[in-house]
Amino acid sequence: MDSAELRAMQAPYKDKYKSDPDAAIITLKAQGSIDESKIACKVETGRALAVAGLHPATGGSGAELCSGDMLLEALVACAGVTLKAVATALAIPLKAGVVRAEGDLDFRGTLGVAKDAPVGFREIRLTFDLDTEASQAQIDSLIKLTERYCVIFQTLARPPKLGLAINRD
């Protein structure tokens, strides 16, 4: 896909959202089922069933997915798609690329071992290895716009208001 094809594909959406901003507000949803027999949650991904469980550093077997890994994978997926879309829109040539995310966790926090240990990632690093002949100015623009338009990156950088509710059957 080239920049003209991308623009043509997105133009009707952009026009619609400019004329009707409320049409751009879409609620994404995820659902999972708590496993009766083990400490796991079966998440419906739309493509397959992902079974998340405890990380081995908290007593898990490692057979199930770790939700922390899934968060990093979502960041990598979103950043990779965003980078490719921006490169396409700006006609920046990319021969190949690898996107990596690493995050540091202190499991003392999630296990309640140390009250001063944070629960969650204390740092996340996102790295792009790009095979490109683009100029440094093009790469700088590519990274700036990828950071700006990557939904997961922006959600982590500027956390949304969160709510929690319990419904009983």
Image (cartoon, grey):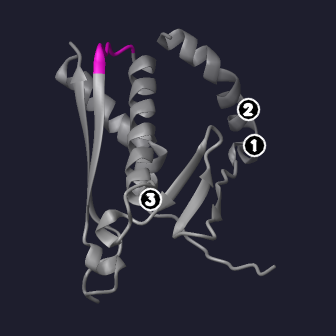
Asked if residue 98 is among those painted magenta in the image, a careful observer would answer: no
Which element type, helix, strand or loop, lies under badge 3?
Answer: helix
> Few, some or many C-alpha atoms within 10 Å of disc 1 (few <14, some 14-19, many ≥20)?
few
Position in image of residue 141 (x %, y %): 30, 30
The amino acid type of the residue labelled 1 equals Ala
Which element type, helix, strand or loop, lies under badge 1?
Answer: helix
> Few, some or many C-alpha atoms within 10 Å of disc 3 (few <14, some 14-19, many ≥20)?
some
Q: Which mark is residue 145?
A: none
Q: Which mark is residue 67?
A: 3
Q: Name the N-terminal-most of marks 1 and 3.
A: 1
Magenta stretch bounds: 91-96
Mark in front: 2 vs 3:
3
- Residue picked out by circle 2: 16
Q: Tell whether 71 sits left or right of 116.
A: right
Q: Tell whether 16 sits left or right of 64.
A: right
Residue at the spot x=38%, y=41% of the render? 76
Q: Name the N-terminal-most of marks 2 and 1.
A: 2
Q: How many marks?
A: 3
Residue at the spot x=51%, y=70% of the render? 39
**Dominant secondary structure of the magenta stretch?**
loop
Q: With respect to residue 101, does 15 lie above or below?
A: above
| Callout 2 touching callout 1 (CB < 8 Å) | yes
The amino acid type of the residue labelled 2 equals Lys
Q: Quadrant of residue 98?
A: top left
Q: What's the CA distance linking mark 1 and mark 3?
A: 31 Å
Mark in front: 1 vs 3:
3
Outermost residue, front side: 37
- Residue picked out by circle 1: 23
Asked if residue 95 is among those painted magenta in the image, a careful observer would answer: yes
| Callout 2 touching callout 3 (CB < 8 Å) | no
